[in-house]
Image (tube, grey):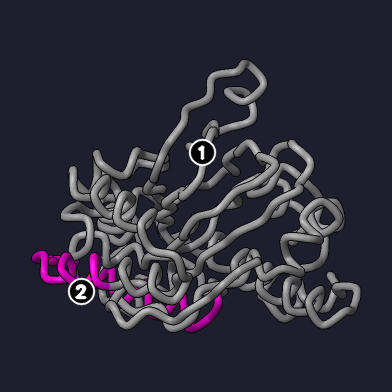
Amino acid sequence: MFVRATSSVPGISAIYGYESTGQPVGVHQGVPSGSLTVVISLDDPIEMADDAESWQRGRTRAHDALVSGLHTRPAYIRQPVSERGIQLAVHPLAARRLFGMPTAELAQRTWEAESVLGPDARQLRQRLHEIDSWPARLAAVEEYFTTRAGLPSTVRREVTGAWSCLASAGGARSVAELADEVGVSERQLSKLMTQELGVGPKMLARLLRFDHALGRIGAQVRAGTTPNLAEIAVRCGFYDQSHLARDFHLFTDRAPSRFVADEFRNIQAGGHQPPTGLTS
């Protein structure tokens, strides 16, 4: 079950509660996206690893609540029998205002929320345990982040301009086009974006294009149709279906068709929906 809401906090593009029970114990992949992720568990801690090798070697961590930076590889998360919590999608250019640091400092890792948000993150989780309805829980999270939204932000205009161009094109813009649009060299743009986001414009374009494709795949699954991968590849700016498949392997460790089969129930329930209304 997903309870999804649009946040009024600038920089938070989506917030939803999730609850499920009776699931087979297994592994779920948290796929990369163009958003930062905050998850607050209302059940047992979230057991996870940042990559497949760590998962296979048993090098996992457990988080009561977490903040995840921009990833370029899937995270591996243990799927318990029952789980309940709240998840937020946060615009990477809002990290300074909401977290007090640029996205680059999250460095493609997942962090215990307290190490990013401070000790009041634990207090928020305790408060959520005392609330017995999803609308009230989501409102409490909204209130918490509203109080943080005034932190100073000094994102360079070249970075915000390049992001805006990429987002409006679903990631289908070249680094040369972006650099020309914002009036700097390709090298300077790559340096500025990496310093702010932890990834350069080329990788960010791939992430946003993948997000776009994943959103279309999810919409077709929820509509009860089999995703037309060749059509989605063309509409999302990939050269062809093979190009789409290569990026799926990079970001999910799976082919698109395998990803849909593995994640079918989660997609149908509302998972893997792209965030809406991204604002910096």
Q: For residue 219, what is the image quadrant?
A: bottom right
Q: Position of residue 129 (x, y in %)?
A: 39, 54
Q: Quadrant of the N terminus?
A: bottom right
Span highlighted in magenta in the image = 143-170
Residue 269 lies in the magenta stretch: no
What is the three-letter code of the residue carrying label 2?
Answer: Arg
Q: Residues within 10 Å of mark 1 (few under 14, many from 20)?
A: some
Of 236 and 149, which appears nearest the observer?
149
Write down the residue under mark 2: 157
Residue 50 located left or right of residue 29: left
Which disc, if any, is residue 44?
1
> Which residue corresponds to the image point at 41% horizontal and 48% vertical from the top-left?
68
- State the CA–CA distance, disc 1 to disc 2: 42 Å
What is the three-letter code of the residue carrying label 1?
Answer: Asp
Does residue 111 sit above or below 103 in this rendering?
above
> Which residue corresponds to the image point at 88% horizontal and 79% vertical from the top-left?
224
Is tag 1's residue or tag 2's residue first in the polypeptide sequence? 1
For label 1, the SS is loop
> Which residue corresponds to the image point at 63% horizontal and 36% vertical from the top-left?
78
Q: Quadrant of the C terminus?
A: bottom left
Residue 153 lies in the magenta stretch: yes
Q: Residue furthest right?
A: 226
Of 272 and 65, which appears nearest the observer?
65
Check if mark 1's residue and mark 2's residue have beta carbons within 8 Å.
no
Does residue 33 sit above or below 178 in this rendering?
above
Of 238 and 133, which appears nearest the observer?
133
Magenta highlight: main SS: helix
Q: For residue 77, what is the image quadrant?
A: top right
> Which residue corresponds to the image point at 19% horizontal and 60% vertical from the top-left?
96
Q: Position of residue 220 (x, y in %)?
A: 80, 78
